[in-house]
Amino acid sequence: MSTIRKISCHVVSAPIERPFTSSRGWLYKTRGSCIVEIETADGIVGWGECYGPAQVARAYIESQYAPRILGRDPFDVEVIWEDLYNRIKDYGGSGMAISALSGIDIALWDIIGKTCGKPVHKLLGGAHRTEVTAYATGLYFIDMDRLIEEAVEEAQGYVEEGFTAVKMKIGLGSPRLDIARVEAVRKAIGDGARLMVDANHCFSVPTAIRLGRELEQLGVEWFEEPISPEDVDGYVEVTRALDIAVAGGENEFTRWGFRDLVARKAMDIVQPDVCAAGGLSECRKIAALAITHGVECVPHAWGSVIGLAATLHFLAALPDQPPSLRPIPPMLEFEQCENPFRDELSTEPIVQRQGVVQVPTAAGLGIEVRREVLDRYRVA
Ligand code: CA
């Protein structure tokens, strides 16, 4: 048995050329992440990633988690998870504490895979699929004077690159403008392409229902985060009122956080993020819980190639929901905004061809991290 010898957090940040925003209103001027590196006594290195404010994740890891896992067996990944969770939950077993824990969990699965010479999805029970359909996440708000034109151009670009599914942002303070923009995008990409919308929880219940009925007419596949995540009763109302699938849950954490959402069927699709909701260990429990309650699980992903690879293994190990002759498999969220940590951090970037991404097959997460990229963008 080789034990955990060292845990390092790489906090990185890169400026981006064209700042963008969503209905949240804050402007993304940089892309960053807390990348977790865990090394064993015999020199095996595992990589993980934490979603959200990177410095906060680092503080949790360095001050609370790292001292508890030094010297332990990485194969005890779930024992370690329970120990760290129970260490922190008296101060809030949700939010950034769990994002930080997610980065450690993913890195440990990477180590286990590399030790066994198996890709992570094999350790999770095997692959239901070797490739996944990816949808392009983009169509944020960049130029406030060209909101419709820029959305149309960007969506056309994705279709030209091969994507068959696109998710766009809505929530421009005017449901009429939102609908005009969705309509323009639908027209531009044609009826054959799949289209989803994401409101980043900016609507009230009645506005969400009224808007949702119009989105149904435009063949939108799901309505993501129509309302605020705290309002579970509101989600139940919106979900029952609309025919269109309602999605949410990217800001929920652990099986306990998802329990009421799925038991009450507050949404049709839950979207745990493997870098936030508790890592691969916890997300497979969340998926089991969701499927048990007849709620679909389609993970959220928004980060570096490390999080992307972890999400691909998680997706590979998700059963069809439901299984059938020609199932509709869960899609990969393949965010397309400028991000060097997605495109440059691994020796071979993860790419889509004809809208499809291959599940990595090399040992562990199946990616090789380029340290010079971490060094280039490192924050002190
Ligand atoms: Ca989202």
Image: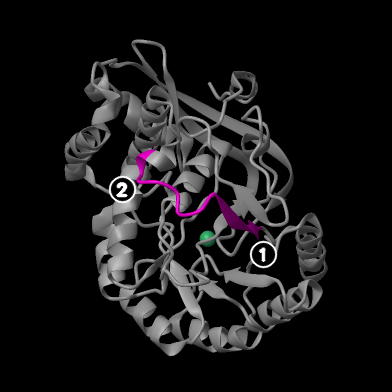
The image shows residue 283 at horizontal and vertical percentages of 35, 51
Seen in the picture, residue 231 relative to 251 is either above or below; the reply is below
Q: Quadrant of residue 347?
A: top right
Amino acid beneath label 2: Glu
Query: If the image is split into quadrants, where does the N terminus sit?
Result: top left
User: Where does label 2 land, which residue?
Assistant: 282
Residue kind at label 1, given as amino acid type: Val
Badge 1: residue crowd in 10 Å (few <14, some 14–19, many ≥20): many
Residue 125 highlighted magenta (yes or no)? yes
**Left or right of 202: which side holds 78?**
left
- Mark 1–mark 2 Cα distance, whole angstroms, equals 28 Å
The residue singled out by tag 1 in the image is 166
x 25%, y 64%: residue: 259
Vertical placement of residue 41 versus 261, above or below = above
| 340 or 63, nearer to the observer | 340
Kindly identify the residue that appears in the image at 78 percent across and 55 percent down. Answer: 161
Is tag 1's residue or tag 2's residue first in the polypeptide sequence? 1
- Under circle 2, the secondary element is helix
Q: Which segment did they paint magenta?
A: 123-137
Residue that appears at 41% across and 12% down: 43
Q: Position of residue 99 (x, y in %)?
A: 38, 42
Q: Does mark 2's beta carbon lie closer than 8 Å to ligand 1? A: no
The structure residue drawn at horizontal position 77% and vertical position 71%, both measured from the top left corner, is 189
Q: Between 19 and 291, which is closer to the camera in this rendering?
A: 291
| Cβ at disc 1 under 8 Å from ligand 1 | no
Residue 126 in the image: above or below residue 72: below
Measuring from the top left, give residue 34's x and y in whole percent.
Answer: 48, 33
